[in-house]
Image: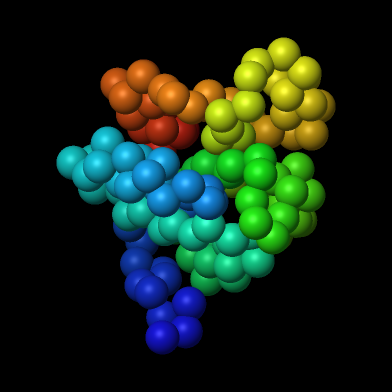
Amino acid sequence: MPICAMNPGSNIPALLIIDDNFSSRMLVTEVLDDTGVHIVETEYGSEALELFTCHSGDIFLVLLDLCLPDYDGFDLLTKLRELDPKVPVVAFTAMTAGLVETRCRESGFDDIVYKPFDLMQFKEKVLSYLNK
């Protein structure tokens, strides 16, 4: 099935999660299951660009891992910003704070979520973007 045939333009708020860790993607899906947020997910940056374009207008937030099999997260952020600079992009990383935090802020990420994360705080953070 073509990637864009996966329910684009549904007017349901969507979260795009780009992470090569299947467990992380499933945990996000479980945590947000009762919120009515549609989860769009991929492990590849190239696929994320296509999904981001297909679901344009529905995506209210992107969670972006910094290390992907086919993309550097900072490079992918630049491409996402070129497509739509208004959609918030949150770094989603297991890297330790410090230098990565400085680089994320300087690169234009809206926020950072460090893995592992507190489930309730994570859910509140995601929903805060939905309500903006």
- Residue 66 vertical placement versus 8 (above, below): above
Quadrant that contains the N terminus: bottom left
Structure colour scheme: rainbow
List the single residue furthest toward the bottom.
1
Q: Is residue 53 left or right of residue 130?
A: right
- Residue 119 vertical placement versus 126 (above, below): above
User: 14 or 24, which is in the foreground?
Assistant: 24
User: 113 or 70, which is in the foreground?
Assistant: 70
| Residue sitting at x 47%, y 84% | 2
Q: Is residue 36 left or right of residue 130?
A: left
Where residue 51 appears, as percent x and y from the top left, is: 53, 66
Residue 124 visible in the picture: no
Q: Is residue 108 left or right of residue 23?
A: right
Where residue 127 appears, as percent x and y from the top left, is: 36, 32
List the single residue furthest toward the left.
34
Residue 76 visible in the picture: yes
User: 76 or 9, which is in the foreground?
Assistant: 76
Q: Quadrant of residue 120?
A: top left
Q: Is residue 78 left or right of residue 120?
A: right
Where residue 62 appears, as percent x and y from the top left, is: 53, 45
Q: How many callouts does the rendering have? A: 0
List the single residue furthest toward the top.
98
Where residue 111 appears, as percent x and y from the top left, is: 60, 26
| Residue sitting at x 58%, y 67% | 47
| Residue sitting at x 72%, y 55% | 71
| Residue sitting at x 55%, y 35% | 92
User: 19 or 52, which is in the foreground?
Assistant: 19
Q: Quadrant of residue 91?
A: top right
